[in-house]
């Protein structure tokens, strides 16, 4: 299929005709990363007519400058100013200050580490039982049993979902993230799979369908106090359901892969289980679950000498920035002893992940349950990547857990 070509906006602009959304680049981004590093601080992608950067410095600068680089025109490839979004925009992800701040305040108190500490015991029990069950199994799929299995058995309950059919959550999250890219085959497949999920999700967000004393009903308490409307509350619950599951599923899968590939790091973690939190941050740096978000220039601006015009989109390649050798010594080495502060997997600035404490809690609890029992995490077959327009992770991880040292 012939693709349109968007000419460079000025004569000497650094350009590339690589299509990062081709399945092979989604599975292995090294060629795209190479282009981003080599061609310039920002590179014009002729297939899409957008700028792209994978440098930590520029990515951070753009994320931090939320006034110029807005989110309300969408954080995917699509410009909400010129194209109709596929669903009512998220009140937090796809919003700018001051509206963004009012929503952020609600979600950050509902998802504060204090608020979540009550969940830890239950999460621990589930993680320990799950690990125990898998210890004697010769070969299993780490994605199904751990990366999906663990979050899906704790997260929907934490939100207060009462209905069955929780697999719709995965279909929906998969769709939400795929719709941040072009309308390629991957997005089309996700849409077919999620057809029923969209209506199901809307229903789960209603107050009457959420259990008392869980995160969803905590959000509705802010509606009772008049800080947000009832409709806003339901859309904030939708944000939890959009961003809360697929991300941690991918993150845990990537974490398993990291430790399977680096047994010496696993040994180190077992010697220092208190390092679980830092180890997870290093996993996020080394194998970032979200590879791409966009911003849109809301005015003419210059970044590192490159003029960007109002209305132009910038692809921010998070996983490339997290491997930037200008920012990280030995960026391509997985090392849980580093202090990966500044890693960009949760984003940077006012939009940095509001659910990060939930993600860290899930990962840390699972990591500690594994570290208590498992001497080695071994791959028993080829991992199968799951191509997604915004996430990078696995569909299958054939593995086994070896007891002992
Ligand atoms: C894909 C994504 C990430 C973060 C937040 C949301 C969605 C949302 O729906 O608010």
Image (cartoon, grey):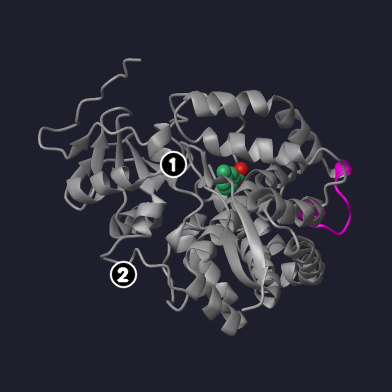
Q: Residue 161 placed where, x, y %?
A: 83, 47
Q: Residue 372 placed where, x, y %?
A: 69, 77
Image position of 333 (left or right of 42): right
User: Can residue 113 be found in the magenta stretch?
Assistant: no
Residue 324, by quadrant, is bottom left
Residue at 75% across, 29% down: 199
Q: Ligand 1 shows up in which quadrant of the image?
A: top right
Residue at 51% across, 68% down: 281
Question: Dot 2, how many residues are within 10 Å of its Cα: few (below 14), some (14-19), or many (20+)?
Answer: few
Residue at 44% across, 62% down: 285
Image position of 305 (left or right of 93): left
- Marker disc for residue 330: 2
- Marker disc for residue 27: 1
Image position of 324 (left or right of 80): left
Q: Where does the magenta region start and end?
A: 208-221
Residue at 55% across, 61% down: 255
Spatial CA span between label 2 and label 1: 23 Å
Label 2 CB-ligand 1 distance < 8 A: no
Q: Residue 30 placed where, x, y %?
A: 33, 47
Image position of 389 (left or right of 251): left
Q: Secondary structure at mark 2?
A: loop
Q: Secondary structure at mark 1?
A: helix
Check the image and report above or below for 155 versus 278.
above
Q: Main secondary structure of the magenta part?
A: helix
């Amino acid at each position: 299929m012939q693709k349109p070509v968007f000419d460079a906006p000025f004569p000497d602009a650094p350009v590339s005709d690589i299509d990062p959304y081709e399945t092979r680049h989604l599975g292995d981004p090294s060629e795209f990363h190479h282009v981003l590093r080599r061609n310039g601080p920002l590179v014009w992608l002729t297939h899409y007519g957008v700028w792209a950067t994978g440098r930590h410095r520029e990515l951070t600068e753009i994320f931090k400058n939320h006034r110029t680089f807005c989110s309300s025109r969408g954080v995917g490839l699509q410009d909400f100013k010129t194209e109709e979004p596929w669903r009512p925009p998220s009140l937090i992800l796809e919003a700018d200050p001051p509206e963004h701040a009012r929503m952020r305040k609600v979600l950050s108190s509902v998802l504060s580490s204090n608020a979540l500490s009550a969940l830890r015991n239950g999460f621990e029990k589930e993680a320990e039982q799950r690990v125990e069950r898998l210890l004697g199994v010769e070969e299993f799929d780490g994605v199904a049993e751990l990366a999906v299995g663990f979050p899906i058995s704790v997260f929907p309950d934490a939100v207060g979902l009462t209905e069955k059919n929780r697999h719709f959550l995965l279909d929906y999250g998969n769709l939400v993230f795929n719709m941040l890219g072009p309308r390629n085959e991957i997005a089309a497949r996700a849409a077919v799979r999620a057809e029923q999920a969209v209506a199901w999700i809307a229903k789960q967000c209603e107050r009457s369908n959420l259990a008392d004393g869980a995160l969803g009903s905590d959000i509705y308490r802010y509606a009772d106090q008049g800080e947000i409307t009832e409709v806003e509350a339901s859309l904030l619950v939708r944000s939890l359901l959009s961003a809360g599951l697929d991300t941690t599923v991918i993150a845990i899968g990537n974490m398993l892969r990291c430790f399977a590939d680096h047994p010496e790091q696993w040994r180190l973690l077992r010697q220092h289980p208190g390092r679980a939190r830092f180890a997870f941050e290093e996993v996020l740096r080394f194998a970032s679950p979200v590879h791409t978000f966009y911003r849109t220039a809301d005015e003419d601006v210059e970044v590192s000498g490159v003029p960007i015009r109002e209305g132009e989109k910038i692809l921010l390649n998070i996983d490339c920035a997290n491997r930037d050798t200008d920012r990280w010594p030995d960026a391509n080495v997985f090392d849980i002893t580093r202090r990966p502060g500044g890693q960009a997997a949760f984003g940077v600035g006012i939009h940095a992940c509001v659910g990060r404490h939930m993600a860290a809690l899930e990962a840390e609890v699972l990591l500690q349950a594994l570290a208590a029992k498992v001497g080695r995490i071994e791959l028993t077959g080829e991992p199968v990547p799951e191509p997604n327009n915004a996430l990078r992770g696995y569909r299958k991880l054939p593995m086994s857990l070896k007891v002992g040292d």
